Image: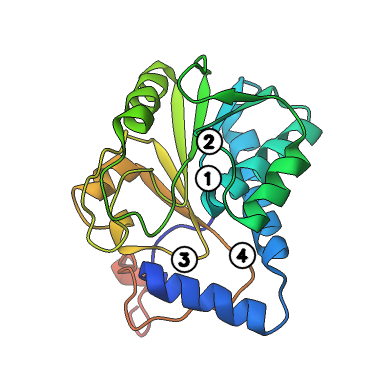
Amino acid sequence: MIPLDGQPILTASEMRAAEDAAVAAGTNVDTLMQRAGEGVAVAVHRLAAGADILILCGPGNNGGDGYVAAAALQSMGARVRVAASGPAKTEVAARAAAGWGGPVETLAQAEPATILVDALFGTGLSRPLADEIAAPLHRLARAARLRIAVDMPSGVGTDDGAMLGAAMCDITLALGAAKPAHLLQPAAQACGTVRILALGIPVTSYVHVLSRPLPYGEREGTR
């Protein structure tokens, strides 16, 4: 997990372009999802410290990341369950869901867990969450001891930081790069502590997070 200091900030379209460029250069889209999901699993396993985990999976690729994370966590011996808002709607997410292979609860009827992982919606959301998504999300978030978002909390505007029904998270695992919503209020408050999970693809931007100032004695050229 990489701290935000000094990291590039990419909009939703810039992040998609970086991923598309990686695929064009020969990186399989399933490989990118596998990297993302396994990175999430390693981080969640460390943070959960043996507690039970519930992963909420949406219909898109963010949900696919969640299914990959669930399978990886299960292989690590974690107590993990999956609840979904509906079936996977992209081919790569459907393959990830098949790779999970375990039971999938409905979002509306899911029972709470100590650790909640929100993988419902990632970048690109532009409208408020539907009530049938927002209500169980908030119910499960209130009941959890630790709430972790995959890429960003479901229900925030990626590029403008708008709140579109998101539940408050304690930790956000940003995939590949920081996004504007991780730093812009009011969404930044919902993100909690943000850490970046590298996907092994080049990301560049003219905009970066400010680095933390060094103590005076550590600055270059000072004594």
Tag 1: Cα neighbours inside 10 Å, few (<14), some, or many (≥20)?
A: many
Instruction: Give the mark nearer the N terminus: 2 vs 4.
Output: 2
Q: Circle 4 sits on which residue?
A: 199
Task: Name the amino acid type tagged 2.
Answer: Gly
Q: Amino acid at mark 1?
A: Pro
Mark-to-mark CA distance, 2 and 3: 28 Å
- Tell me the SS state at disc 4: loop
Q: CA distance from mark 1 to mark 4?
A: 21 Å
Horizontally, residue 220 falls left or right of residue 18, namely left
Amino acid type, label 4 = Leu
**Marks 3, 1: nearer the viewer:** 1
Q: Quadrant of the C terminus?
A: bottom left
The residue carrying mark 2 is 86
Q: Nearer the viewer, residue 73 or 49?
A: 73
Residue hosting label 3: 177
Q: Are marks 2 and 3 in contact (CB under 8 Å)?
A: no
| Residue 109 visible, this orientation | yes
- In primary-sequence order, the first of circles 1 and 4 is 1
Residue 6 shows up from this direction: no
Label 2 vs 3, first from the N-terminus? 2
Alpha carbon separation for disc pair 2 and 4: 26 Å
Of the numbered discs 3 and 1, the one sitting upstream in the chain is 1
- Residue 197 spot, x, y in % from top left: 56, 57
